[in-house]
Image (cartoon, rainbow, N blue to C red):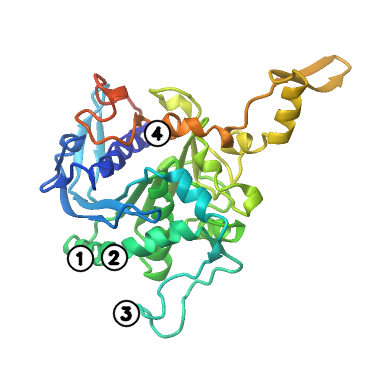
Amino acid sequence: MPFFASLERLARLVDITYCVGTTGVSPPFSCASRCKDFPSLKLERTWNTGVLLSDSCGYIAVDHGEDRKASNGGKLNFGPAIIVAFRGTYSITNTIIDLSTIPQEYVPYPAPDDGDRDGHGPKHKCTNCTVHMGFMSSWRSAREVVLPALKAARESHPGYPIHLVGHSLGGAVAALAALELRLSLGWADITVTTFGEPRVGNKGLANYLDAAFSLKNGTTEDAEKLLYRRVTHVNDPVPLLPLTEWGFRSHAGEVYISKSDLQPAPEDLRLCSGDNDPECMGGAESEDWMTWAWGALRGQEKEVELDVEAQGRTIVTRKFPARFKLWQLFFAHRDYFWRLGLCLPGGDPADWGRGRYNVSWNAHDDL
């Protein structure tokens, strides 16, 4: 249950990024949305690199830690941390589709002109790795602002771990930022949580990220020890984009929300195994567009007989492939504990009237 409470809290924190570039986030930590829920946070700085396809917005804040009462009288403790939050984009489909056909080689930072380089090249080489050009461009535009501010915050608050969080495009940028911080700069105290993260690169890059965050062998039994939590939601098309046909692959660390509507409960979360768990978003990946279309033409868009066994027929429901449900960009892609994406009092109108999650938990619960 502490794990569930942590994800819900981070969902509110990433929702605040949508105030950057609109109504704003100001010191100490104030905005039109949910900033008042976090009295222990102090804003370090915000950034906004523009409204192009490679835009990046977000903020860095220092969390001095807070204790929050759970409904059973216990405490949910969120210790001190440095929060780096990356906003999504309002043009996620354009970013994915327009630029995804031009993958580029992924070369880990430090770059040749980076002052942190020791002259011997990147320590961790990524073999046969390609990255989505738009996502990499977004991180490159943000890193010139983010890295100096983050280094300053880290020096001022030694011992504070760093937590990267992002939604949508911001999730992809957080992934690339995390790789640089953990491997190129050697910062071990990095935890990443993304919501609705698209595929960042090819299989080589997915393997590289899995190894960097110890995800290669699937998930750990202790959810709290996951260094990378890639939260997905049933019917959200973005985690299945860009398409595998274009050479892109998902990485491990997936935490799957199986409930289609708000509000999810702890029992609606599943810790997934490996890069493509068929019980999570990987199951939607197996839905074939041409098979669905052919079945629909034959009047079998609802049910199809897969097998005839001695004891009877095996019938399954044929569903429209999730990766093509682009209307879900307005619903499932934004419904991560709260409906994310609007910097208004109380957040999105879908959340108006809702109180904060008030969960009970047991210290021995995994979620």
Mark earlier in primary sequence (3, 2): 3
Q: Secondary structure at mark 4?
A: loop
**Which residue position holds label 4?**
334
Report if the CB atoms under discs 3 and 1 are less than 8 Å apart: no
| Residue 107 relative to residue 305: left or right | left
Give, as a three-letter code, the residue at label 3.
Gly
Q: Residues within 10 Å of mark 4 (few under 14, many from 20)?
A: many
Mark earlier in primary sequence (4, 2): 2
Is 235 in front, or is 182?
A: 235
Give, as a three-letter code, the residue at label 1.
Ala
Is 116 in front, or is 136?
A: 136
- Tag on residue 147? 2
**Which residue position holds label 3?**
115
Tell me how far mark 2 sits from mark 1, CA to CA: 9 Å
Q: Secondary structure at mark 1?
A: helix
* Residue plotted at (67% across, 37% down): 286
Q: Secondary structure at mark 2?
A: helix
**Which residue position holds label 1?**
152
